[in-house]
Amino acid sequence: MSNIIRRIKEGEKLVLWIGDAISKIVGLPTKKDLARSICTDINESAKNAIKDKKSLAEVSQVYLDSISGSKSKLLKKIRNQYSGDDSAGNPLKVFAEAPFVESIITTSIDDLVEKAYGDSVFKVNYYSEDLGGINDKKLYRVNGSLADLNKTIITKQDMRKLDILPIYNEFFNRLAQEINGRIVLFIGYDLDDPDTINNISMVLNKLEGVRASAYFITSSSIINTTALNWLNANEIKLLKQSDMEFIEAIREYMIGEGIVDLPLEEVRQEKKSLLM
């Protein structure tokens, strides 16, 4: 963490690569939650075809393959999972005030980033024709979004199309330009979710030749061999802390540097704790 702060102070820029574990904090579902819910609607014989029930891509593909005319049902079920209360404080707001965040990439489909940034980001979906201007701070949506649910990347077949169809090449070319020479921070990802490695690997494989310094935030005390090998193969360094611990450390740095103001109530609390 101290190394990242030092590099930020030296003027380096961050590219945030955000997963859905951040969304879990405010009550929104993760891909594993969606997979678990969808799996309950699959008959027992079809469930035997699922190699990993924690993978949304795999579970949703079996759902489509086993239930006739089920695409609309699948999307409706997914949308219903996002009907809960997400009014809790948005942990991403601290990044919206950070001048050292150059751009954002996300594989989540909820709108948590947009709610944090408001109109200060230009949204680029994998299928967008308008990729924004040179001065726009961009949010790259690798899997699409709830706002256009019919175009979201959910199943294994969806992922395959995104991977092989040349019409999406310009999107990935832009990602390469954003990442090259910058610090890439993976935050809000669960290494126990098989889609984490699969989704990120698909993108990284399209960015050959790109040089970036990458960090992966995780509070997991035990990391499986597959995940460790993947991190090492992609030269991604581990930061052993929780997402919220990292966000709080960034917030404290920004307060210390005068980038953001400490709310009055928090000043009072800090003074009170010093006097005790």
Image (tube, helix red, strand yellow):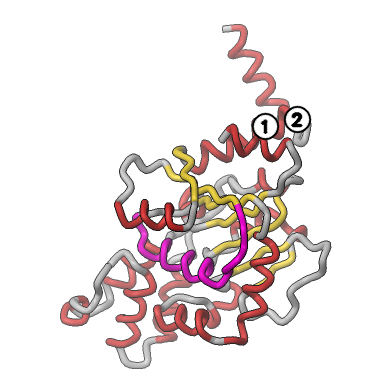
Task: Indicate the amino acid at tag 2.
Answer: Glu
Answer few, some or many: residues within 10 Å of disc 1's Cα (few below 14, many 20 plus, some between 14 and 19).
Answer: some
* SS for dot 1: helix
Task: Give whichever of 209, 162 is nearer the camera.
Answer: 209
* SS for dot 2: loop
Residue 114 seen from this side: no
Q: Give residue 103's position: percent from left, percent from top.
A: 69, 57
In the figure, residue 166 lies in which quadrant? bottom right
Q: Is residue 202 magenta?
A: yes
According to the picture, the residue beneath numbered tag 1 turns out to be 253
Answer few, some or many: residues within 10 Å of disc 2's Cα (few below 14, many 20 plus, some between 14 and 19).
Answer: few
The N terminus - image quarter: top right
Find the residue positioned furthest to the top.
Answer: 275
Q: Give residue 200's position: percent from left, percent from top.
A: 48, 64
Q: Could you tell whether 209 is left or right of 30 in the image?
A: right
Q: Residue at x 62, y 80 (%)?
A: 169
In the figure, residue 190 lies in which quadrant? bottom left
Q: Residue at x 59, y 50 (%)?
A: 213
Number of disc labels? 2
According to the picture, the residue beneath numbered tag 2 turns out to be 257
Q: Is residue 81 magenta?
A: no
- Return the mark for residue 212: none
Cα distance, mark 1 to mark 2?
6 Å
Task: Indicate the amino acid at tag 1.
Answer: Tyr
Q: Could you tell whether 36 is left or right of 232 in the image?
A: left
Range drawn in magenta: 192-212
Q: Decide: marks 1, 2 in contact (CB < 8 A)?
A: yes
